Amino acid sequence: MLKKDYRCFNLISLMKKISLILLSIIVLVNYNCSGSSAIQEGDNLDFKQKEWASAQEINRRLGKGINIGNTFELRQSLQPNFVFDDMERIAGLGFSHVRIPINWERADRSSSTEPYTIKNDFFKTIDSVVKEALKNKLHVIINLHHHDAFMANPTTNKERFLSHWKQISDHFKGYPDSLLFEVLNEPHDKLNTSMWNVYLKEALNVIRKTNPKRCVLIGTAEWGGISGVKYLSLPNDPNIILTVHYYSPFQFTHQGASWTEGADAWLGTEWRDTETERQKVIDDFKPVLKLAMQKGIPIHIGEFGSYSKADMDSRVRWTRYLSSWFNQQGFSWAYWEWNAGFGIYDPKTKSYRMQLIDALLNDKLLD
Ligand code: BGC
């Protein structure tokens, strides 16, 4: 009897060992197949999303945000190192989300030929940045930024664009609802208004296969501005947010910008916060508010900001008026940007531009 029990015990322990080995093999195979493991033990993040919040609720939670601009969307030679502590700084200031512009098209990050595979190492880099933001209780938006080859030749590069979304959505499918996808930054060039309406739906269909409920932001053609709103045909999907960019008056926000032709001639342009200037903002946003009313779609302002060559007093007035007005409309927003030419933080001296920060975060000032 003893012997039989002993043998039986041995058999059970052998079976346990075999199942453990099998389990490990399955885990390893899965790890390799998905390109890399997005979620890992020890992350200390609750990735078991049970209830998915509505787009309205997510937009409310997005609230006030900032772009980690001039970082992951830049060319390889220009990209500065990302500083992980910045997420804590951003959360500490009182922002509730970060928008992370990303260029996945870059030659060192993905292959330009079929099957357009995004490199594991790059997924790991973005994983670590997103996780750092989530650990600091920030919501996160990731996008496709400066996908210039796609926009220069949309028909030829369509499969590459859709393949990127297939890989990205598959990789991040286990993340909580505080991670959002934005289909494409500032569609322009050959990607015209009607093509964009078709392609954005195709990308959304790809995303929905693996992320049925994740909030997806959709921007407008013609560089993501308000002028593109009238051409936009929105997909019938409850979990989408409309995102627009606002840099008006452009001669003020982009004065002296080296990447904008003729911008030196605008140096000295002020924004005085007059009734006329305020009214211009309100008039500009009429199509956005109309669409929001008609479709019940939440609104996010994905970029707004002024370049450092404008005078600080005007920048403060413009930033304060816009952020307060956006809050009043129930829009969420992300200031352009954290620590470069438009930035609220100087990484060299590790100092804050407090006037701009107050203008963004103190919303009692709209009179
Ligand atoms: C671009 C940046 C630019 C900013 C303001 C962004 O969409 O990616 O390069 O600095 O707009 O012009």
Image (spheres, rainbow, N blue to C red):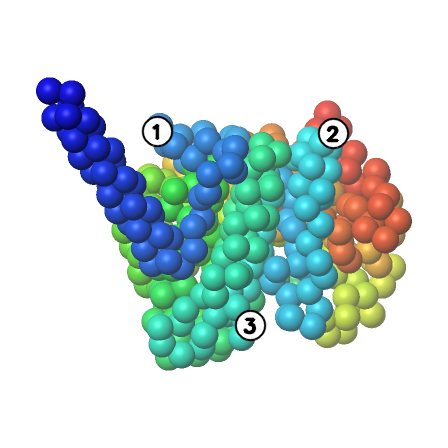
Quarter of the picture containing the N terminus is top left
Q: Which residue is mark 2?
A: 362
Nearer to me, 49 or 242: 49
Q: Residues within 10 Å of mark 1 (few under 14, many from 20)?
A: few
Q: Disc 2 residue type?
A: Asn
Indicate the secondary structure of the residue bearing disc 1: loop
Q: Position of residue 41 (x, y in %)?
A: 46, 38
Q: Position of residue 66 (x, y in %)?
A: 65, 44
Q: Which residue is mark 3?
A: 108
Give the residue at x 56% y 59%: 102
Q: Is residue 126 visible?
A: yes
Q: Earlier in the sequence, mark 1 or mark 2?
A: 1
Nearer to me, 19 or 82: 19
| Discs 1/2, front | 1
Q: Identify the mark at residue 50; answer none if there is no mark.
A: 1
Q: Disc 3 residue type?
A: Asp
Looking at the image, residue 333 sits to the left or right of residue 2; the answer is right
Figure quadrant, ligand 1:
bottom right
Quarter of the picture containing the C terminus is top right
Looking at the image, residue 13 sits to the left or right of residue 300; the answer is left
Q: Earlier in the sequence, mark 3 or mark 1?
A: 1
Height in image: 9 above or below 283?
above
Looking at the image, residue 72 sits to the left or right of residue 350; the answer is left
Nearer to me, 16 or 349: 16
